[in-house]
Every structure is written in structure tokens, then in C-alpha cells.
Amino acid sequence: PIQVIKILMSNGVMANINQQIDFDTAAIVVSELGFEAVPESLVEEEKVETGEIPLWRRIILSEKPESLIPRPPVVTILGHVDHGKTTLLDAIRNTNVAEGEAGGITQHIGAYQVEHKGRLITFLDTPGHAAFTAMRARGAQGADIVILVVAANDGVMPQTREAIAHARAARVPIVVALNKIDRPDANPDFVKRQLAELDLVPDEWGGNTLVVPVSAKQRIGLEDLMEAILLTAEGIEIRANPKGKVIGTVVEAQVDKSRGPIATLLVQNGTLEVGDVIVAGTAYGKLRAMFDFRGRKIRAAGPSTPVQVMGLSEVPEVGELFTRYDSEREARAVVEQRKQEAAAKAARAPKATLEELFSRVQAGEEKELRLILKVDVQGSLEPIINSINDLPKGEIKVNILHAEAGNVTDNDVLLASASKAIILGFNVQAESSARRLAEAEGVSIRLYDIIYRLTEDLEKALKGMLEPET
Ligand code: GDP
């Protein structure tokens, strides 16, 4: 700021640190500092063209500016395992949901809302990178703000760095919750130095990052955290047109034995109503009923509101976008077309799936089953490799070509394609580009969240009994 003010003054503008300056003046200042200024509107347009902006944001951008009104910020919590994400989500939920209801809210539908000083904040309550990445992979990017939980006694860890990378790639601002400050071994200053090294310089040190000391367990600092979220929200455009085109993201979905497919949707623009017909991926249907996060029946949900809906034809994928259609006929036609396109694509791709590889092995064309293994954390590698090696193999050798922590990337797919291997993921996602590449290359990516299922499938494959992938 001092440098900027100096240049302004040398140009005859007696500016103070809070002053707004126009574009032309700013352009002169930055050019003196060796940069080129580009108007934000152009940057936005460019981003829209390159498809960097998620579709729902593009929809909002295409709305008339005067129709846009502020909506609650949508917040997601990321951080290293055991740093307190779940505890923090529960603490916020129990502390800030209106009096008398706290005890009643036991169901987790994937998102909830709290009120702080008369303003709403929407929390996505599936902590962890998987949910965030799933959303990002489909270009949905549901969150406006990321809360990065860092344990004050443990500091920056591998998944902390990953979370920062995710948030930055999605261009979502980060608020740091410095958790577990109640612990005797907490060392907040040490952690702040670590954060500063990662370019998250705490505001008290002159940086832009709000670092809020909290104890999720003892519920200390939660008000400050809410305050920091609202402050951050003020700095970014968090708007939508409640009367505009209805679009949003699938936050959670499952089949309920008695009620059929159930999905939690986050409305991002427009207002979703009971009786609306929506399409999410290849799921469609007329919404028979909607519930808020307290499980209460509601008839309409505006921007940033999470709702649980009934009436879809199948379970949509998490992270999938949904939009409203005028009639069930139209929706069905869209879904039919999507299914046909997917089938045509699958038919074009040469298959190198697990079951295919196995049949080649059986025919004597292959003597080994090559695997690429991707897992969530380094610590998962050894137990999984051990259980793979423990499988009864008979004639066939299992060869693990590559094993590491991290999501399935393009490189993994290329390696698999080149070496006719299949990719097994444990608690990870496939990046969207990797997924596309795999489809084109006919590489099989199988993702698991239970080790037993992974080894069970492999065992079946080794015995030649594996059901084809669906
Ligand atoms: P997650 O893996 O990030 O979701 O972490 P959890 O919320 O499951 O918390 C991991 C452990 O840290 C649990 O045993 C919590 O009780 C504990 N924990 C979470 N927050 C705090 C805190 O503020 N103080 C202390 N002392 N322990 C905490």
C-alpha cells in the first residue's frame, strides 16, 4: 500500500489507504510498478469463454445485474484428517441453529444453515476433499468460501496443502480456523508462520488471510469465525436472481428404502418449488416433496438454500448440476439423449477393463494383472498393498506398477493406457480431465471407499467372476 500511495502522490493524487481510485488511475499506478491492468469485466468474459467459470456462475452472470440480490455465502470446510472438521461442523450447527431446535437436528442431509446477527450462512457438511473435488470435477464448485481447519498443535500437514491447492484452483477465498487452541501443546504462532510461508499471511501481520483461533471441542471462537465468514463474503460477489433460471448442485444423494431416490440439492440461482421438473445428470423427475435441513416440509427454496427432494427417477451423482425444465416430457427427452450419448461414447472406446484384462490373462495372452493404485493418504498404501499381495492368485501375477497418495490424474491414465493397467482408487476421486481421458483411452478406473470391496473385486477378477462395471 505504501508504494501505491507514493506513486499516486507523485501523480498528484493525495490518496489514503481506503480510497477508491478509477481504472485509468489504477492502470497508471500498476504500469509504474511493471504490470498491466485489465478491466475486471474483460477478465470475467475471458473466463466465461474458456469455461473456467462453473456453469451456475455463468448463468448468474447472464442474469440482468439489477435482478441480482445478495444470497447467503456457501461455506465448505477442508483440512487435514483429525484436525477437527467434523467437530467444528457439529459445533457450529449446535451453537448457531436457533434456540430450542439444536437438540432436534440429528439428520445430516449434506448441508445446513445457521444465522449470525440476522444473516444466514450455508454450510456444506460433508467435510473433506472428496466432496469438494467431486463438485469441482463437474465444474460445479458449490462453495463461495473455504474454511481451512488447521490444528494449532499439529500445524500444516499434507492435506492442508492439498486443501489450499483445491481452494486456489477453484478461486475460492480461504478463512483459516486455527483449531484446538485449548490444547496445552497448541502453538498458534508457529502455525501462522507456516501459513505465511504458503502465502496465507494472517491479517494481523499485514496479510489478507483471516486466521481465527477456535476450539471446536470447547466451542471457543465460533462467533469470531462466523464474523470472519461474513466479512469475507462482503468482499466477493455473492448474489443470485431468486426469480431467474433455476440451477444448482447435487450435494448428497442416496436411495431410501421407503421413499426412493433422495437427493440434497443446493439451489444456486432461481427458486426451486414443489412440483418443479428437474434434470440432474441422467436423473429426472417431478419433485413430489421438499424438506429443509431440519426435516421440515417446505414448498420453495431460493438461492443458497439446501433442500432434500423426493421424486427423482434415479440417484444423481454428487456434484452434478441440476436445472429446471418445463415438462416431464422435455426432461425425459434430455435424459434419453444424455444416456444415448454416454452409451455411444462407451461403445467407441476400446475396453481395457478389469474383466477384459482378465479374460486376456485367461486366454494366455497376459500373465499378469497390472495395477495403478491411488489412495487418500500415504498411510493407506501399505495396508492396501499388503491385502492385495495376500490375495490367492493362482497362475496370475498381480503387478502394482505405481502406488501413491492423491487423486487419479491424467498421468495415471496415460501410464495405465500405455501399460494396459487398470487404476484402482481408494477414497480418492478421478480428476475430470482424467475421467475424460480414461473414457477416450478405454482405461478402467475403479474407485472404492472400503478396502474390503477393493480386494473383493480383485479377487473376483482373479477368479474371472467379476461383474462388469456399471
Ligand atoms: P476431522 O477428521 O478433521 O473431521 O477431525 P474430527 O472432528 O473427527 O476431530 C479429530 C479429533 O480431534 C477428535 O478426537 C476430536 O474430539 C478432536 N478435536 C476436534 N476439535 C478439537 C478441539 O478444538 N480441541 C481439542 N482438544 N480436540 C479437538
Image (cartoon, rainbow, N blue to C red):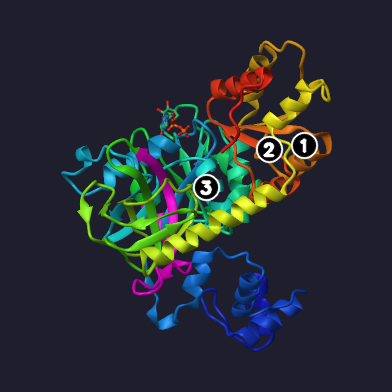
Choose the circle earlier in sequence order: 2 or 3: 3
Residue 412 pos. (x, y %): 74, 39
Choose the circle earlier in sequence order: 1 or 3: 3
Disc 2 under 8 Å from ligand 1? The reply is: no
**Residue 444: mark:** 2
**CB-based contact (under 8 Å), mark 1 and mark 2:** yes
Residue 68 pos. (x, y %): 40, 76
**Residue found 75% across the figure and 43% down from its top:** 350
* 244 inside magenta stretch: yes
- Crowding at dot 2, Cα within 10 Å, few <14 / some 14-19 / many 20+, comes out as many
Magenta residues? Answer: 226-255
Compared across the picture, whether 442 is left or right of 114 comes to right
**Residue found 75% across the figure and 74% down from its top:** 35
| Quarter holding ligand 1 | top left
Pick the residue in front: 464 or 213.
Answer: 464
Q: Nearer the viewer, mark 1 or mark 2?
A: 2
**How far apart are the alpha carbons under marks 1 and 3?**
26 Å
Choose the circle earlier in sequence order: 1 or 2: 1
Q: Which amino acid does label 3 sit on?
A: Phe
Q: Nearer the viewer, mark 1 or mark 3?
A: 1
Residue identified by numbered label 1: 416
Q: Which amino acid does label 2 sit on?
A: Ser
**Residue 132: mark:** 3
Q: Which amino acid does label 1 sit on?
A: Ala
Q: Is residue 413 above or below residue 392?
A: below
Q: In which quarter of the image is the N terminus?
A: bottom right
**CB-based contact (under 8 Å), mark 2 and mark 3:** no
Helix, strand or loop status at disc 3: helix
Q: Is residue 252 above or below residue 365?
A: below
